[in-house]
Amino acid sequence: MKANIVAFYLPQYHPTAENNAWWGKGFTEWTCVAQSRALYRHHRQPNIPADLGFYDLRLPEVRAEQACLAREAGIAAFCYWHYWMGGGKRLLNYPLDEVVRLGQPDFPFCLAWANHPWMRKNWNAKVSRFCQEMLANQTYPGHQDIDDHFYTMLPAFQDKRYYKVDGRLLFLIYDPPALPEPEYFMQRWQELAQKEGLPGFFFVGQGDSKMIGDPVYAKFDAVNFECIRDFFNESRVRRITAYTLRHPITRNYKDILRAYDLKTAAMPNVCPTLYPNWDTAPRRGYIATVFHNSTPELFEKHIRQVVDATTNPHKLLFLKSWNEWGEGNYVEPDLTFGHGWLEAIAKAQGITR
């Protein structure tokens, strides 16, 4: 059955002044990916890109080829992780700004506001997982900042390629409870959209399925909950133990699929998440979480299972992710499976590539 699969897209594949200062000149996600090594027997690391290589997102040719691959697989849009840290501070914005400026590639896109602070431990396995050093804090300076945020992103919202649900601009917020005034934020952006002749926003709040019933999410048009019961809630003690024993926390991918919360995925306001894999070893080393023995064949079954369960009227699902190589959830071609992940997405939707 054809679904509307929107793929999260990480723009951490080009040098930035901040990364140069924090990690050394030229640091990108590829730095961690290339340095990763197997941490136990049959651990599938490192994962090496195939067709696109260790690309640089400053190149329009790379962005065009990504769009071509996504379109062939039946992906509806890229959802760029968008980093507005408050006070006009943005991170990793160059690829999206170029997509908007050039009008290419001709492929739908939308935004997901990653409203969380950047910690030193987030991006590099060589840093202690228990390090609390702040690199860039997420701030909420006030109402004027909400307006400034909207107008900074207005060129993207005005772009004809911007992905819409029910005729409205899809905008996802990573951590709704962190917003000081989430209801005001959404109401104000709806007012500004109307003022600028835009059709308004379709707001999606992201969170854990344990947050079902939280009143913050009731104001959103839809929610994107993690539907894997308890998997991401490993205790600090267990992570310390994993680090001490020099063996990451592993779960068999088949067990993950059995644990997938289809009851939550079937709720009419839920846009569930698809997971091809998960392996945070490039970023986290021995304190990583790993989905073991994932394959494109199992991923295809997972897609069919979730699409069949989904009841939201738009058949809207989020793919985690298009290119988060440092967390092991990507569907771009690699040397192990070739185009297998993309073919799984197409086959599950009855698309012939």
Image (cartoon, rainbow, N blue to C red):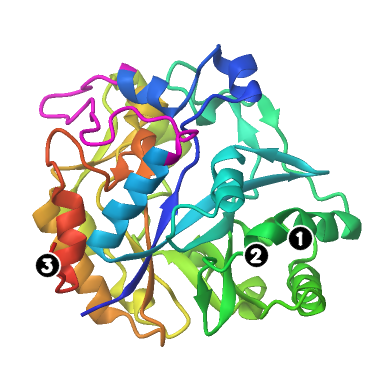
Q: Secondary structure at mark 3?
A: loop
Residue 339: where, in percent of width, then height? 16, 47
> Which residue is label 2 attached to?
157
Snapshot quadrant of residue 183 = bottom right
Magenta stretch: dominant secondary structure: loop
Amino acid type, mark 2: Phe
Q: CA distance from mark 1 to mark 2?
A: 9 Å
**What residue lies at 77% left-to-right and 80% top-to-bottom?**
194
Region of the chain picked out in magenta, as a range: 35-60
The C terminus lies in which quarter of the figure?
bottom left
> Which residue is label 3 attached to?
352
Residue 190: where, in percent of width, then height? 75, 76
Amino acid type, mark 1: Phe
Q: Earlier in the sequence, mark 2 or mark 3?
A: 2
Q: Assess whether residue 37 is covered by the magenta stretch.
A: yes
Sort mark 2 into few (<14), some (14-19) or many (20+) by Cα contacts within 10 Å: many
> Which residue is label 1 attached to?
150
**What residue lies at 18% left-to-right and 64% top-to-bottom?**
346
Residue that sits furthest to the top in the current view: 24
Snapshot quadrant of residue 242 = top left
